[in-house]
Image (cartoon, rainbow, N blue to C red):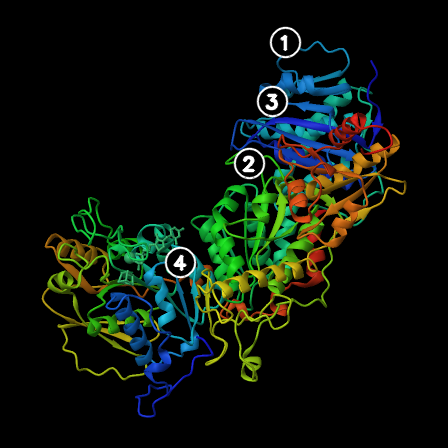
Amino acid sequence: MKNLKRINDFVIRFANVNGSGSASANNLFAKAVFRLGVPVSPKNIFPSNIQGLPTWYEVRVSEQGYQGRRGGYDFIVAVNGQTLEKDYDDLLPGGYFFYDSTRALSGHYKRKDITLLGMPLTDICNREIENPKLRPLLKNIIYVGALAHLLDMDFSVLTDSIAKQFSKKPKLAVPNIRALELGFKYASDHFPGACKLSVKRSNKLSTHILMDGNSATALGAVYGGATVAGWYPITPSTSVIEAFDKFTRQHRLDESGKRKAAIIQAEDELAALGIAVGGAWNGARSFTATSGPGISLMNELLGLAYFAEIPVVVVNVQRAGPSTGMPTRTQQSDTLACAYASHGDTKHVLLFPCDPKECFEMAGDSFDIAETLQTPVILMSDLDLGMNDHVCLPMEWDDKRNYRRGKVLDKDQLESMTEDWGRYLDRDGDGICYRTYPGTHPEKGAYFTRGSSHDEYAVYTEDTDAYKRCMERLSRKWVTARTLVPAPRIKRSGKPATWGAIFFGTSTYATYEAIEMLDKKGIALDTMRLRGFPFQDEVLEFIDQHKKLFVIEQNRDGQMRTLLINELGIVLNKLVSVTHIDGTPIDARYISQSIEAVLAKTPKGGAA
Amino acid sequence: MNSKRPVFRHPDLPKNNLGYTRRDYEGLDSTLCAGCGHDSISNSIIQACFELSIEPHRVAKLSGIGCSSKTPAYFLGRSHGFNSVHGRMPSVATGANMANKDLLYIGVSGDGDTASIGMGQFVHVARRNLNMVYIVMNNGCYGLTKGQDSATADKGSSSRKGQPNPFEAIDLCEMAVQLGASFVARGFSGDKEQLVPLLKAAIGHKGFALVDVISPCVTFNNTQTSTKSYHWIRDHMEATATVDFIPQQKEITAQYEQGATQSVSLHDGSAIHLHKSDNSFDVTKKRVAVNALEHHREKGQILTGILHVNETLKDTHDILETTDKPLNTLTKKELCPGNQTLQKIFENYR
Ligand SMILES: Cc1ncc(C[n+]2csc(CCOP(=O)(O)OP(=O)(O)O)c2C)c(N)n1
Ligand code: SF4
Ligand SMILES: [Mg+2]
């Protein structure tokens, strides 16, 4: 048997029972790797349940900085009896299986190609920890202590982390540090030299931060000047609003301690978006955050906002559908539902962030884009991005930057206006008209906003020409939108590439890694990462430059592929789907294998 | 409303404190059926705003969908209006109010718009005590979709084309009292004498003010068999007390007899005087209001007037502790914490 032997390059998976306090211990481990300067990518794979069901925490340690999922597990910490067999079977050959040996393993466990590391965690807890209430929690800390020895980690990073975590209640740090030591001691007594995977201090990280996408999105909304938020709780979007609430309480109070934000937990998602629409109509930057089922409910109001031209921002942290689907698993499966949300001819601006940095930037920009275009903007995040921690460089906010509030007439402008004003008059030919906020001027600028057909002066009309003029102007505005959404990121392989790959959002990092893997095998692909909808000319140009292209995404039906075909008129078989649908984040090995399988069937010399 | 519409002002029309005539509070010509109760309510809204010298542009009118929800186009033409989607006016009004606490929000809805599709939103805007006037133009049917029974249609009542309604009716006022709405009143579109002061009191109130106005649909629901018809209401209407609304500016004189009058002072210093009759009651007590409503219902009567007032409840902004300045006036300087703070925030993520 050949043991896996690697420094700063492995995947460790923790198998726990949810609600057992494992999350903070596992976090402690990931944070320790991060604090040792080594790029780390933790993924929480958890059930839609409060207590008692299996949950996994997967940590990828990668000196090279790969942030996507790699595929496969080299080390498993198995502390959940319910999944023990499967966890055991899933371990890669040469890997390490760490388990609670208080109960002996049954006859199933016969693999010869892995290293067993049994530690009587429950026994140790019962013997060493007096307070029975603390035992289940500290059991998790004990295995982290053992890992520190097994993976040869600098122990002080862990103890410092504990001290930092409990800086306000130092008394609580004591039993935690003792638990770490218990684990470390047991491992050094019983497993000397047993594990050939290790974490060494590195200089790969400098000013980096470890942050979840939802916090970054919320910060973007704070910096972008959002003041009104309507929401209804739904995983995985809830923490966007919780973070917005927290940050505005800390950084958005007036001199008397009153809040410069109004956050309303609505009765449902219809009301949540209704609140955001009302706020936006009245001149406050307003948003809501939701996930698939909420998007379904918001459809009618999205159509209203589109047709009445109200600049509202919707954050969609996608999860696995359809229906309730897998509420705590990730997917990119709302692309079509959002692009064309609501009845009638509607189209919405979409933004696709790939990491917390882009969550922050795009959330900030989304208000500028929405107000410039006077239309809804949907930020397409997902559970993987929103709820998992990601290593990234700290974002910057340019203090000189001003909010672009779009074409809004103030009192003086209305006063000095000689020409005739109509809310929906396209003076500039870009499809975007001039709006006014209620209460601006005693005699000028009032109009009637409606979701029913209206003429240039916002008056109800069933005149077919007026209706057509309005719909065609909205199409003109859509053309303008292409100049405002972020451009795609194109990377050339540097070799003649007949194939290209298109992807977006959280498929990004795993895809880049897969492309590198393929490149090493002599398969060159140019790549284009989409960042917004509507698509710009560059998107079509890139597609035109290649014979065939893979569209890599996390849903069953290849929704982005459909959108590209529909919007750009691409020949159907030019775009080949690579889809990943099991609700876990897409991984690099899966992508490279899928691409290789397609190419193997394609005649030599490239795409047919 | 529409800047193309010529405005003709007669020099002799009476003016209010702002120098505006009643015409300055009118809107476009109504397209509702002649005789529709909703038009009378629009007129009462115009009258109330004119008499109170409200600056028209400091009002935002919002509505859902229905004949009733069309009316904001027919009053206050100098105010911004928002005809949203069916049953969702309360949430849109909530967001609008959050954005600017300084405007007067008048919401108009129908009984279908409120008591069916929008029931959830109605309930929650009431319990949040949003500072707004919420007018239900209640005709016991769906006018715009041609006369189906609504959830406020009385059991046994039948519209022009319908069978007697077999379901229980929802009493929006009684519900609102229980939900904690801070102002609840009921009027009749055909009784301007009562409706105008009710609307004025609702406008003066800070918090959620429901005015449920029985408003006969002459096209689909004005028959002998309908309990929301003109003649039925006229025969069965009972008023709690006559209402006088005394704006804050006016000196409150002692012309009302103690004992026969209940005075409620409103948040802004104005006051309501209720001239008590024998069957009137203390409007500040929730339970008394519910009892009175039930009592009259059992007798086959419709109780109108001010049913409940509670001036001590906080409105949504006070509950959320938002800043005094309207949120939509805050500038980048007041909203954006700056890059230095951002970098400090990141210390917690290392
Ligand atoms: C989502 C949705 N469903 C149905 C309709 C059709 N609709 C329009 S108005 C209306 C009922 C209106 O009744 P009410 O609120 O009582 O107003 P009224 O016309 O009686 O004044 C309905 C069902 C709609 N516009 N939207
Ligand atoms: S149908 Fe009824 S509610 Fe609608 S306008 Fe005519 S009378 Fe009024
Ligand atoms: Mg009705």
> Residue A283: image x %, image y %?
53, 67
Q: Amino acid at mark 4?
A: Pro
Camera-side residue of A289 and A540: A540
| Mark 2 in CB contact with mark 1 (< 8 angstroms) | no
Q: Earlier in the sequence, mark 2 or mark 1?
A: 1
Badge 4 and badge 2 in a common chain: no
Along the line of sight, which residue is nearer the eye, B138 or B205? B138
Q: Nearer the viewer, residue A410 or B126?
A: A410
Q: Which mark is drawn over residue A106?
A: 1
User: Residue A68: horizontal and vertical position, in percent?
Assistant: 74, 37
Label 2 resides on the chain identified as A
Q: Which mark is residue A80?
A: 3
From where the camera sits, is residue A148 visible?
no
- Residue bearing mark 2: A321
Asked if disc 1 and disc 4 are in contact, CB closer than 8 Å, the reply is no
Which amino acid, mark 1? Ser
Name the residue type under label 3: Asn
State whether residue B90 appears in this view: yes
- Whole-number angstrom distance, CA of label 3 to CA of label 4: 48 Å
> Residue B90: which numbered mark, if any?
4
Mark-to-mark CA distance, 1 and 4: 62 Å
Above or below, A280 relative to A6:
below
Q: Is residue A132 left or right of residue A31?
A: left
Q: Secondary structure at mark 3?
A: loop
